[in-house]
């Protein structure tokens, strides 16, 4: 069989296929917005900048990280800018991805 996980903005949808047919589905209440909020809180940046960083640099495994880049991000304390590393994004995003995969694993 095959499992397909669609991580949307508000929910993640799991579909399990076997012999060409859907055998089981599940909706998880954890999705992309949670990753964005985690970044905003962890980096003390705005939601819009957290979303940008997630889309442009977000990783959940270090196996694909080429180099630890330094990125510029808005600060929640007004117009100040701050510098963050891609490894910081990984440390924030990876536990949320692990949480989703553990829930999927339990469901399967």
Image (cartoon, rainbow, N blue to C red):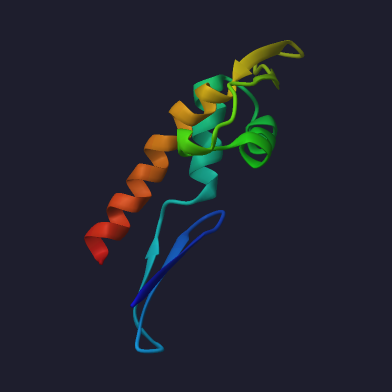
Front position in the image: 77 or 32: 32
Q: Is residue 3 above or below residue 17?
A: above
Q: Is residue 81 above or below residue 8?
A: above
Spot occupied by residue 64 in the image (x, y as percentages of width and height): 53, 38
Residue at image location 58% in from the left, 37% down from the top = 58
As drawn, is 90 to the left or to the right of 86? Answer: left
Residue at image location 63% in from the left, 32% down from the top = 50
Front position in the image: 33 or 90: 90
Q: Residue furthest left?
A: 106
Residue at image location 57% in from the left, 28% down from the top = 40
On the image, which quarter does residue 98 sit in? Answer: top left
Q: Is residue 91 above or below residue 98?
A: above
Spot occupied by residue 67 in the image (x, y as percentages of width and height): 59, 24
Q: Is residue 80 above or below residue 71?
A: above
Q: In this rendering, does residue 77 appear at all?
A: no
Spot occupied by residue 68 in the image (x, y as percentages of width and height): 58, 21
Q: In this rendering, does residue 4 appear at all?
A: yes
Residue at image location 73% in from the left, 10% down from the top = 80
Spot occupied by residue 41 in the image (x, y as percentages of width and height): 51, 25
The quarter of the image holding the C terminus is: bottom left
Q: How many marks?
A: 0
């Amino acid at each position: 069989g095959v499992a397909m996980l669609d991580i949307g903005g508000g929910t993640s949808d799991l579909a399990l296929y076997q012999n060409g047919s859907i055998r089981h589905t599940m909706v998880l209440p954890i999705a992309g917005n949670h990753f964005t909020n985690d970044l905003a809180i962890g980096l003390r940046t705005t939601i819009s900048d957290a979303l940008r960083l997630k889309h442009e640099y977000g990783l959940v495994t270090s196996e694909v990280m080429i180099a630890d880049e330094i990125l510029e991000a808005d600060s929640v304390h007004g117009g100040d800018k701050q510098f963050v590393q891609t490894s910081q994004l990984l440390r924030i995003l990876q536990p949320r991805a692990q949480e989703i995969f553990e829930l999927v694993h339990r469901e399967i």
